[in-house]
Amino acid sequence: MQLVVDPVRHTTSPLVTGGSVIGIKCSDGVVIAADTLASYGSLARFQNFSRLLKVTDSCLLGGGGEISDFQEIQRLLENLTTQDFCFNDEHKKSPRSLHQYLGRVLYAQRSRLNPFWNSLIVGGYVQSQSFLGMVDLYGTTFESEVLASGFGVLLGLPLLRKAYRPDLTVQEGIKIVEEVYRVLFYRDARSINRIQVATATVDGVTISEPYSLETKWDFKGFVNPRSTYDESTW
Amino acid sequence: MWKESSVVATMASLQRPDFMPYQNNGGTVVAIGGEDYCIVSATTRLGLGFAIPTRNVCRYSILNNRVVLATAGMFADTATLHKVIKARVKIYEEQQDKPFGLHSAAQLLSNTLYYRRFFPYYTFNVLGGLDEDGQGFVYGFDAIGSGEKVKVVCNGTGQALIQPILDNQVEKKQQYENKQITKLSLQEAVDLIKDVFTSAGERDIYTGDAIDICIITKEKGVLVETFQLKQD
């Protein structure tokens, strides 16, 4: 009789997860933001967890989805940048290369039916050019002026598309992203009103300390929610 | 024996739900082969369920100055397949010092797809270009490499909406009365493609935003133009 032994698998369903990541391309750089919550199912388990990462002096990564997989990806990128450093030839991976690299890694993992359960947003600013790209757990890679993952695709993307202009500055971008996270916090139950905003500009990469967003709960619709049987759809 | 292993399989599936490795990103691709031209076109919308993660992706690859490949279906598989095909074409052209022909590309594509018969690329391809005589031909393939050489083909989510119109207007099939068969000029073919995509965009949520139209002629090689569709 043949004994069926499954190979070692890590994540085929996520346990500790991060929520939406959001990115917007600006004329003088890119902005990527994430809230600081790492949920354990519906439990708000880790409330001060950073999901933003500086990869190189010009490249940023934001991650949603399974946190342990994100940390593994973090280790892969560390190896990659360490190798670049050891060559000692001043060459560094461009944001576009890293985006494509992550795409191949996630595609390879999904092809082994053992995916890295993440949505990743890669941002960078090299030679006066902004870069913003996304990778999902299937290895789908694409670039866009505005990007969102998770619940942010449904609630955030329309707001980002409305607010986007090619001549946006990073300062304006940060304001837009904050507004989107405020909206997400009101409706996405797996979010928190504590965010980090990262930018890649000509001055390099900066990741802000976590800070709380002001919220307002005395809107009429929040104080007196209409019943299901009114004309309300929500 | 069968019984025991199936018990083990059930146990495993109780422990964790199986990961589904496929995703449908939609998209429609159309190709028309004319007397002295070929047109290959693809939508740029990346759809996912009821959302549009982005409106501007590239679903075609220019393999050389007379062959273009366009693909609908899962976008991660599309990108991978295009990488594989482009690499194989490049290696061939470097080693043999001659351009990769249309019919060779069709065979390569078919073999590449069938090689993954039991874990297919979830892609629906059209391949268009000029043959040795400069005549336009197109190929349509399913996800596992079955395909045929035709004059006009549509693949992807808009296939059922577009293919019958192309059969009628390009191949003059199912005409009420036997009309005189006139071959479409390049401009007429481009206009037809713009029309069918615009119409498909009204009914198919995965078709919209824009199309890339690759026009292949002997004189000018591959020219690409973009035509905007509705963004709703």
Image: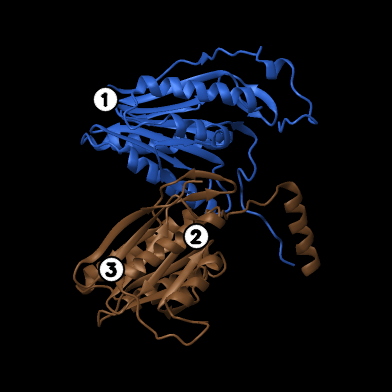
Residue A90 at x, y percent in the picture: 22, 34
Is B163 displayed left or right of A54 in the figure?
right
Disc 1 marks a residue whose amino acid type is Val
Q: Is residue A148 above or below residue B104?
A: above
Image colour assigned to chain B: brown
Mark 2 residue crowding within 10 angstroms, few (<14) / some (14–19) / many (20+) = some
Query: Mark 3 sits on what residue?
Result: B216
Tag 1 residue: A202
- Which chain identifier belongs to the blue chain? A
Q: Residue at x 23, y 73 (%)?
A: B99
Secondary structure found at label 1:
loop
As drawn, the label of residue A183 is none
- Distance CA(mark 2)–CA(mark 1): 45 Å
Give neighbour class at mark 3: few <14, some 14-19, many 20+ (Cα, 10 Å): many
Q: Chain of mark 1?
A: A
**Helix, strand or loop at mark 2:** helix
Residue type, numbered disc 3: Ile
Q: Amino acid at mark 2?
A: Ser
Q: Where A153 falls versus A213 (above or below)?
A: below
Residue position marked by numbered label 2 in the rendering:
B199
Badge 2 sits on which subunit?
B
Rendering coords of residue B160 (x, y %): 56, 67
Circles 3 and 2: CB atoms closer than 8 Å:
no
Q: Are marks 2 and 1 on the same chain?
A: no
Is residue B108 or residue B173 the one in the foreground?
B173
Could you say where residue B49 lies in the image, as x and y percent from the top left? 59, 48
- Could you tell which of marks 3 and 2 lies nearer the N-terminus? 2
The nearer-to-camera label among 1 and 3 is 3
Q: In the rendered image, which quarter is residue B191 located in?
A: bottom left
At a point 43% along the width and 43% down the height, the residue shown is: A102
